Amino acid sequence: MINLESTDKISLISSGTADLDVFASYVDRISSTEVQTPGRKPTAIVTAATTDIVLAPAAGTVRNIKSIVIKNKHASGSQTVTPQINVSGTLYELCSDCILLAGESLVLNDAGVWFHYDANGGVYGQSLPTASDTVVGGIRIATQAEQEGATSTVIAVSPGRQHYHPGSTKFWVKFAGNSTTINASYNMTSITDGTTQATVTIATDFSSADWCVQATAVAAAATAAGARLASCLTMAAGSIIVFCVDGNATTALADPTSWCVAGMGDHA
Amino acid sequence: MDHFTPQLVKFAITMMDGSLQVMSFVTVGRGNRLPWGASWIDSENGLWRRHPTDENVRYEILKTFEDHPEQPQKWRMVDAALIPEDRTFRGAWEDDGEKIIHNMEKAREIHRERIHYARQGKIKELDVAYQRADEDGNPDGKRAVVAKKQILRNLPDATEIRNAKTPEDLKAFWPEDLLGPQPIGLRVELK
């Protein structure tokens, strides 16, 4: 809140001729008796000038400012206004210069906060600085392209886009060695069991056949005969063929106990 | 989110070369984007549903085999319970339109190949034994080795194999004393 004593007043600097309506509300309190009396002062400004909009109270009285409304009611012209307080002849600016476009308002509320309203009554927002390692501020969501670029350190990752990062796994699956059961999976649509191999089909394809597959065949036992060595064949943008052999000296194609297959690369 | 297990239906796919592929077609899956033909059940948790319509299945099969060395000829949905559990003769599976069966001619050929594969090492061992017998001046030993080698050579032509009517008949013919342990059900020979 703003309190005025008998040597204080509030004036408004206006820059142009756009019509300004000013309305100030206040409560006077007589210090000796604590009697309080409300008051108000309307002011119309049509010139570039410094105009008193709240006058000094009488001696022994404190004038508590409840609100000041400064409205540019011109149809098209703008005004730059600067509220200031005159304390015993010394001027102090109460807020920054404010450019009021046609229909806009500058309002001081009871808490002493200034708001700049646009012609539709919306409040002009504060501009946040961009957050960084050392600055507290605003942060926006990374786009798919930004996530794929993987370089920014000042934008946030959302759950629906984190997988676009080149270091993120794009699909994975665990399925039985006889390809009858899919135990768990993400972003894949089928397993096809062949005579000596299995084909994993991916839901969202990679952008080309150049992606990285990680395939592990779970062994039947910790022996050469039980070991399973995974291999892959025919990588396409949307599928991969996997097969494995046992660990014997003379290897043979063999089903593993189960398969674990995953892929990383660029999504289409 | 609790552990998620995809839901599946099975398709028997007959390939141009006569072999059989069995597809586990996911009908309820999880991912960040919808697969072709799918719709969200719970988009916040990435759960989608995809009905096994002719169009969706065709799309999935053509996509799966796009760069495959073999191409599909026909397919149909099959009951998972009717898919053989024993994969000893997986390469002999065929779809007769009602169930998945073993083509016994193929199964016999697979069994003969396994015998070829298993006996290679045994014949090499017998070659060494023959050499020793020869160095020892042991004609009886040499004759015994020759006889064993001939038995091994004759094994693929055994009447038990020619007359086998089922995969169990084939599995029953495996002279372990000559060939060593029979390959387990999941094993497929190296071609």
Image (cartoon, helix red, strand yellow):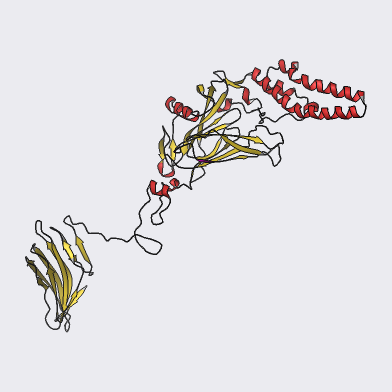
- Horizontal side of B65 relative to A101 (left or right) equals right
The quarter of the displayed image where residue A204 is located: top left
Residue B106, above or below B7? above
Q: Residue furthest right?
A: B137
Residue A24, above or below B55? below
The quarter of the displayed image where residue A88 is located: bottom left
- Horizontal side of A169 relative to B166 (left or right) equals left
Where residue A243 sits in the image (x, y, percent)?
Answer: 60, 34
Seen from the viewer's position, the closer of residues A188 and A37 is A188
Q: Which quarter of the image is occupied by the C terminus of chain A?
A: top left
Where residue A79 sits in the image (x, y, percent)?
Answer: 13, 63
Seen from the viewer's position, the closer of residues B184 and A136 is A136
- What are the residue bounds of the magenta stretch? A206-214
Q: Residue at x 11, y 81 (%)?
A: A58
Query: Do we see residue B61 in this rendering?
Result: yes
Query: Do we see residue A62 in this rendering?
Result: no
Residue A147, above or below A7? above
Residue A190, above or below B155? below
The quarter of the displayed image where residue B108 is located: top right
- Horizontal side of B60 relative to B141 (left or right) equals left
Q: Which quarter of the image is occupied by the N terminus of chain A?
A: bottom left
Where residue A100 sits in the image (x, y, percent)?
Answer: 15, 61
Q: Is residue A16 magenta?
A: no
Main SS of the magenta part reads: loop
- Horizontal side of B174 relative to B24 (left or right) equals right
